[in-house]
Each structure stands twice: as C-alpha cells, then as structure tokens.
Image (cartoon, rainbow, N blue to C red):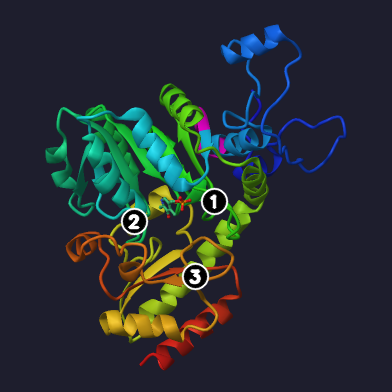
Amino acid sequence: MARKKHPETIAIRTQAERTKFKEHSVPLYLTSSFVFDNAEIMRAMFSDEVEGNIYTRFSNPNISEFTDKICLLEGAESGVAFASGMAAVFATFAALLKTGDHIICCDSVFGSTHTVLEKQLARWGIGHTYVDIQKTNEWERYFHPNTKMIFVETPSNPALDIIDLVWLGKLSKKHKCILVVDNCFATPILQQPIKYGADLVIHSATKYIDGQGRVLGGVTVGRKDLMVDIKAFLRQTGASLSPFNAWVLSKSMETLTLRMEKHSANALKVAQYLEKHKDVESVKYPFLPSHPKYKVAKKQMKLGGGMVSFIIKGGLKRGKKFLDAVEMASLTANLGDTRTIISHPASTTHAKLTEEQRIASGILPGLIRISAGLEHIEDILEDLDQAFRKSK
Ligand SMILES: *Cc1c(COP(=O)(O)O)cnc(C)c1O
C-alpha cells in the first residue's frame, strides 16, 4: 500500500474529480439537485444500492471534498458537514441520544453547547453532568448506567483547559460510552483525537478551518456505525452545509498547516509577553510550562494553537477598559481569524451562564481571551502594550 501522505499534502491534494474541462482548481457546484441517466439508476440511488449525488441536502461534490479532507486528516472512517459548528454539535447529540440518556461534559465548554445541554436537551429528558477536569480521580463517580456519551473540548473554550486524551479514551471504553471531542481549537493539524480513542470529532469550521472570517460551517467525523445515524439525521432535518461554503472551506484547508504554525508561534510570543507583564495576574496557554497540563499538551498536541487567555489585574472594570483601549485587535465574536481578536467571555459568549457557572468554568470577571492573528508579532505586542498603558 502507498505510504499515507503528509497532512500538508492531503489538505492540498484531496479534490473532487475533474470535469471534462480539466480545471486545475476545483469548480463550485451550485446546484440543488443532480440528474439521473434513467429511472433504474434513480431507483437504485434512492435505495442506497448505488452511491451518488441526488440532492444537495444529502450530498454535493464540494461538500464531499471538504468532508473527505477532514476525515483523512483526523483518521476518521466517515463524516458529514453541517451549516455551522452548532448544527454539528446538536445533530451529534440528537442523532445518538434519546430520552433518559445522560452525558458527561467537561465544565469549560463553548457557551452555545452549554446552552444546548441546559435548555434544549433538558426539554427532551436528556441529562448531563459537568465535571471538573482538574479532578480526574472524581470522574468515575459520575457515570451512571444511562451515561451514553462523554463530550469534551481540549483545549477548551475559553478556559484553555487540557484533558489527557489517552486517559479519557480508556475511561470511555471502560464505561462503553461514545467519546466526542470538539477539536475546534487544535484543528486536525495539531491534534487527532481519534488516535487516542475518540469515537467522534467535531469542528466548528467557522474558526481556524476557514481562518479568514468569511463563512460558517461545521463537521462531525468518526466511527462509521455512528456516522450512519448522524448522516440520516442531517438528511432528514436539513442543517446542510452550502456548497459555496464547502468550496471556501476546502480552499482554506490548503493553507491550514501554514496558518496553524504561524498562529501558534504568534500566540506563544503573546503568552510569554503577558506572563512577564506586571498588570497580568495569570496567563493560560497550552505550551507555556506554567500551564497545569503542560506535559499532557506537549504529548498530544503538535503546537500550542492560536488561543491565549489571561486575567488582567483590576477585574471586570479594567478588563473592559483594556478592550476599549486596544487599537488594532478586533472586538468581535469570532476566533481563529487572520486578524487578532480580543474578547471578554464573561460579558459576551458566556453571559447566559450564571456567575456561579462561569466561575466553575474558569471564566473569571477579568478573563480576557486573545485569538492571535497572523499580523507581524511586533504589531500585535505593541497594540497590547499601549492598551495596558492607556487602560491604567
Ligand atoms: C464557535 C465554536 C462552536 C460553534 O461553532 P459555530 O460555527 O459558531 O456554530 C463550537 N465549539 C467551539 C469550541 C467553538 O469555538
């Protein structure tokens, strides 16, 4: 068998079949449906005897190309793309769980995922327990006979917690649970959770995979038997990725490796700068030796990623002043962009949580999250420096 190509190459060279025009770059298939040669082929395709594109809610060459790339990079058997990351998260829950089931979730998790667990799944009698990722010896006690799924983010949004995937993979097998990892912060370039025993991996492609703040998208990849149900759920309920967004995302993937290397290099420098700053209480970055799970991060991630969080001295008031003082970095509800982004989770993405829930998730009032962009590092640091001075 031919040697598996390197991730850089896979992300560039995986592509839909060329048309008769022999285009080099992949064309955009803006079509809602596809034609059949005859009634018999149409029948065979509808009954899944023959594979092929029928209707863009089910599949489309641009969507398949994008999904194939993610599957190859994550080492997944199968996958399906969605209109957004949250559509992927929700479909994964809804397709695999039923009333009475229970989910174990890490306590720092993306704000909307938190809200889906609290407000949506709870209405259908699907329960959950948040567990403290620092106290791994306590996890065993939260498993019940109806616990069907473990859902984690590592690194987590926004606390940048790291969970040992080798340990979690074993724990999940022992309890016969489906292990789902939201791999949004790392991307398949920096971490492949399936290697460690994850059954499914989710991405908000809106973030690093697009990387240029243009389109929304999501994807779930992993075990084929589980993906059959998730695919059916999407086909029936319709949160499909648009071919245009799939085309943008697939193009973006060609530069993902380069971008992740640069995001990680810039973020490490930002983290090192913050660690030395006298107005900073603490800094969290997976590849800083001061991170509580530094060794685990080094073991399971190729680089530290582009996200840094820190707690500014002076709490909420100083935090808001700091955000107002920043000149270049954008105040915007996104991350993983070429442009450096700065945000204040307590008053934005995690505002729907109670103060108590926020503290439990590591979201202190003075927590500031930085998504290090691809600008020159000197310009990024200069902006932060003047903001510290101006916000005194
Ligand atoms: C943004 C994000 C999501 C949701 O993705 P959308 O594309 O915005 O729906 C899910 N998980 C994490 C970790 C995220 O950062």
- Residue 163 visible: no
Type of amino acid under label 2: Gly
- Tell me where residue 245 appears, x and y as whole percent: 62, 47
* Residue name at image x 66 percent, y 49 percent: 248
Mark 3 or 2, nearer chain start = 2
Position of residue 62 in the picture relative to residue 144 (left or right): right
State the residue in front, 211 or 84. 84
Callout 3: SS = strand
In space, the residues marked 2 and 1 are separated at their CA atoms by 17 Å
Identify the residue position indicated by label 2 in the image: 111
- Looking at the image, residue 348 lies above or below residue 244: below
Residue lying at the far right in this picture: please name it.
Answer: 21
- Residue 312 visible: yes
State the residue in front, 27 or 336. 27
Q: Is mark 3 within 8 Å of ligand 1?
A: no
* Residue name at image x 54 percent, y 35 percent: 71
Q: Is mark 2 within 8 Å of ligand 1?
A: no
Position of residue 207 in the picture relative to residue 15 (left or right): left
- Tell me where residue 102 appears, x and y as whole percent: 21, 35
Label 3 crowding class (10 Å Cα cut-off): few <14, some 14-19, many 20+? many
Type of amino acid under label 1: Leu
Residue lying at the far left in this picture: please name it.
Answer: 141
Identify the residue position indicated by label 3 in the image: 341
Mark 2 or 1, nearer chain start = 2
Q: Which part of the image, by quadrant, shows the C terminus?
A: bottom left
Identify the residue position indicated by label 1 in the image: 216
Q: Is mark 1 within 8 Å of ligand 1?
A: yes
* Residue name at image x 67 percent, y 13 percent: 42
